[in-house]
Amino acid sequence: MRISSFGVFRYKLPLTEPLQMPRRQLYRREGLLLRLASDEGDVGWGEAVPLPGFSEERLQQATREAFKLKRITTGREIAGDWFEEGNDFSHALGDPELSPSVHFALEQAAWMLAAETREVPVHRLLADGDPHEALPLSRLLAGERGDILGRLDETKENGYRAVKLKVGQDRSLDDDIQLTRALGERLGPGVALRLDANRAWSREEARRFADGIAGVDVTYVEEPLAEPEELPAFAEETGLPVALDETMRDVSLVTLEEHADYAEAAVLKPTILGGFGGLVYFANKAADLGMRPVWSAAYEAGVAMMGLVALAACSKGDAAPLGADTYRRIEQDVVHPRLKLEGDASSIDVEEAVTVKRTLNGHLLREV
């Protein structure tokens, strides 16, 4: 297979409301789309969209890397079965050094191209066995206490199997405890309660929180500690199930087992971790070790969201509810029609999300 062209496109998409990030507010999402095309006319797209305050790289660095890839990829002959030995596409390019967002975009575009060439949906090409046909969705609860509690009945009626609440942010510790207890009482069985602290607390504060919500059925709390190296001891002394998010950037296949000893779940954000097919293997390894993989978005546009759905569909066993609610904040998308991840939807049809032919909104893209 010969790569006949490599396109790089930039976008700026408004958000429905400002997003509070560390040290700044975000009013729009800016990212890149990479386009791989073969001599046969097949095309694959990938999305690179660093998240300020969380991603290691900035968009300027991602753009430089994209142009480097364009130089070394255009006109290149690539074995058509490059993915069959578990290799990354970048391996066929000599393993250039790439930041996570660009690594994800390149691999996504390559897998999408391979899937189109073989006329097979990408999630079926990725999966070791039969992929999931539908994925449950998690609902992010945001706003004032009254708004959050007022939406619970609607959330349950719509069939959501998980909700997520940010803690350690705008409310006091006592208010977080009271709201968590209220949610636990009202949710009832069948709806998982996830908490996310974003490393907000000291160990003592987190211990107070754990004591305050004793008896509440919490699936896990993501990253409760400002000092993540204290997580193993915290989990043991409190019994509170913890999930890793930011920590996952420093976890490899070699070190995964030591984290599985204390962590209940691993939150996998592909555009922040990097890679594509290799993440499926990583997630399955985590599952084998008893650490549940939870796939999650990070305010990406529709191209990356298609990739996220495809990856999550490859989950072993029962799929954990997909954290895709950030997509609601993207006011205008680069693809049309949008993915069916909004409104009252409590699940998504994988085949529809991955295989429906979508057009690109050219007025939102600028080739660079």
Image (cartoon, rainbow, N blue to C red):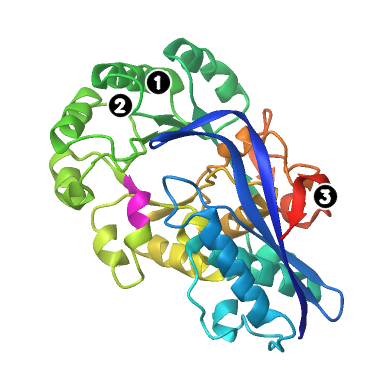
Q: Quadrant of the C terminus?
A: bottom right
Kind of residue at disc 2: Val
In the rendered image, which residue does mark 3 sit on? 362
Is residue 157 something that shows in the picture? yes
The reply, left or right, for residue 161 in relation to residue 1 is: left
Q: Which is more N-terminal, label 3 or label 1?
A: 1
Is residue 315 something that shows in the picture? no
Q: Which is more N-terminal, label 1 or label 2?
A: 1
In the rendered image, which residue does mark 2 sit on? 216
Q: In the rendered image of this protein, does residue 52 appear above or below residue 18?
A: below
Residue 183: give its label. Answer: 1
Magenta-drawn segment: 243-248
The reply, left or right, for residue 270 in relation to residue 69 is: left
**Relative to the observer, which residue lies in front, 110 or 290?**
110
| Helix, strand or loop for disc 2 | loop
Cβ–Cβ below 8 Å for labels 2 and 1? Answer: yes
| Helix, strand or loop for disc 1 | helix
Q: Does the magenta run of residues contain 244? A: yes
